[in-house]
Image (cartoon, helix red, strand yellow):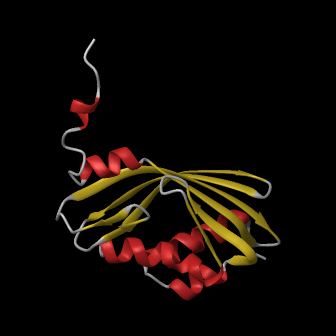
Amino acid sequence: MATNEQVIRALYEAAEVQDVQKFVSLFADSGYVYDVSAGRKYYGNEIGRVVDIFATAFPDMHRELTDFYVSGDVVIVELSLNGTHRGPLELPAGTIPATGKEIHTPCCDVFHLKDGKVQSFHCYTAATILLGQLGVLPNLAAAFKKP
């Protein structure tokens, strides 16, 4: 049987090659993905949308895995989401058209596993950095009061 770290590495590999079926197969029947920055949870076959959304927006998406922390059935991964925004990025608040800009966005993923299957995957993407890199926050400074 694969270790929990091996299961999570296989999950990232499936996302890299956009193998949605394999990605979803690594989850327990009751498993889910929680995109914390978007405030959205995905269950069942909808879990594959997480791969599709990023593959559509960033066809060259690469997840650079920097650190793994494993404690029993919990795996935490620090990574960077890297790619060029060449397609529409679907978010719960709306869709951002392609900007042609590159992203190198920090992310931290927390997984809970049981019997070799993912029970939960909480993705903490640095959304303000991502949106800034896409150029959709050009006037953020105007929102802050000057002392």
Q: Is residue 16 above or below residue 41?
A: below
| Residue 2 in sight here | no
Q: Is residue 46 left or right of residue 113?
A: left
Q: Quadrant of the C terminus?
A: top left
Residue 78, compared with residue 13, is above or below; it is: above
Tell me if 47 is positioned left or right of 101 in this view. right
Vertical position of residue 49 compared to residue 123: above or below:
below
Residue 99 quadrant? bottom left
Residue beneath the point at 30% across and 51% down? 131
The residue drawn where x is 32% and y is 53% is 104
* Residue toward you, 5 or 47: 47
- In the rendered structure, the answer to whether residue 140 lies left or right of residue 113 reads left
Residue at the right extreme, as displayed: 115
Residue appearing at x 16%, y 65% in the figure: 100
Quarter of the view holding residue 5: bottom right
- What x and y, as percent, mark residue 30? 76, 75
Residue at 58% from the left image edge and 76% from the top image edge: 47
Residue 145 visible somewhere in the drawing: yes
Front-lying residue, 43 or 16? 43
x and y, in percent, of residue 108 in the image: 53, 50
Corner quadrant of residue 4: bottom right
Q: Position of residue 88 (x, y in %)?
A: 28, 72
Placement of the N terminus among the 4 image quadrants:
bottom right
Closest to the observer, 39 or 57: 39
